[in-house]
Each structure stands twice: as structure tokens, then as C-alpha cells.
Image (cartoon, rainbow, N blue to C red):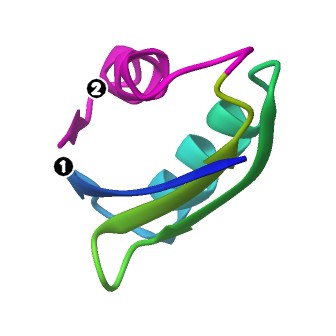
Amino acid sequence: MTKIELKIEGMHCGSCAVGIQMMVSSLDGVKSAEVSYDKKIGVFEFESSKVNKDKIVKTIEELGYKAS
């Protein structure tokens, strides 16, 4: 299991964080996704054999946010 923390820019409210959390959680191999609007970060735990950091970042950016 791999755990990463990403800085997420562009969130305007708590609903933005919930949307990101839901989309990333739906990816195959993602065990947990916690996004904090207040802290502007996301913590993601996943199986690296099924999904990787680049796929998570791409999913977040497809929603219109910047992740690094």
C-alpha cells in the first residue's frame, strides 16, 4: 500500500473537496481518499499495482484543479 499527500489548488468550497474525494475513491486500487478544503491537501492510499500517483493527479486535474 502506498500513501501520498498532494497539495490541491483551485478548490472554492467544501463541496469541491467532496467531489475530488469521490472521484479519486472510485478509481480501481484506491483504498482511501481524504481531501481537506481548509488545508488544501489530499491524502490518498492506494495499491501501486493497480493505480499510480500520475493517474490520481490526472483525475484531479480533469475536474479542474491543480494537484502537486
Where are the magenta residues, as a range?
49-68
Question: Is 57 included in the stretch rendered in magenta?
Answer: yes
Image x and y of residue 66, in percent: 18, 36
Compared to residue 65, the image places residue 43 above or below, namely: below
User: What residue is shown with label 2?
Assistant: 64
How many marks the image carries: the answer is 2
What element does badge 1 sit on?
Answer: loop
6 or 13: nearer the viewer:
6
Question: Is 31 included in the stretch rendered in magenta?
Answer: no
Identity of the amino acid at label 1? Gly
**Left-right relation of 6 to 3:** left
Looking at the image, is mark 2 or mark 1 earlier in the sequence? 1
Q: Residue at x 37, y 16 (%)?
A: 58
Q: How far apart are marks 2 and 1 (CA)?
A: 8 Å
User: Dot 1, how many residues are within 10 Å of its Cα: few (below 14), some (14-19), or many (20+)?
Assistant: few
Q: Which residue is drawn at 64% across and 26% down?
A: 48
Marks 2 and 1 in Cβ contact (< 8 Å): yes
**Left-right relation of 53 to 31:** left
Residue 10 tag number: 1
What element does badge 2 sit on?
Answer: loop
Q: Which corner quadrant holds the C terminus?
A: top left
Image x and y of residue 51, in percent: 64, 18
35 or 46: nearer the viewer:
46
User: Dot 2, how many residues are within 10 Å of its Cα: few (below 14), some (14-19), or many (20+)?
Assistant: some
Residue 37 tag number: none
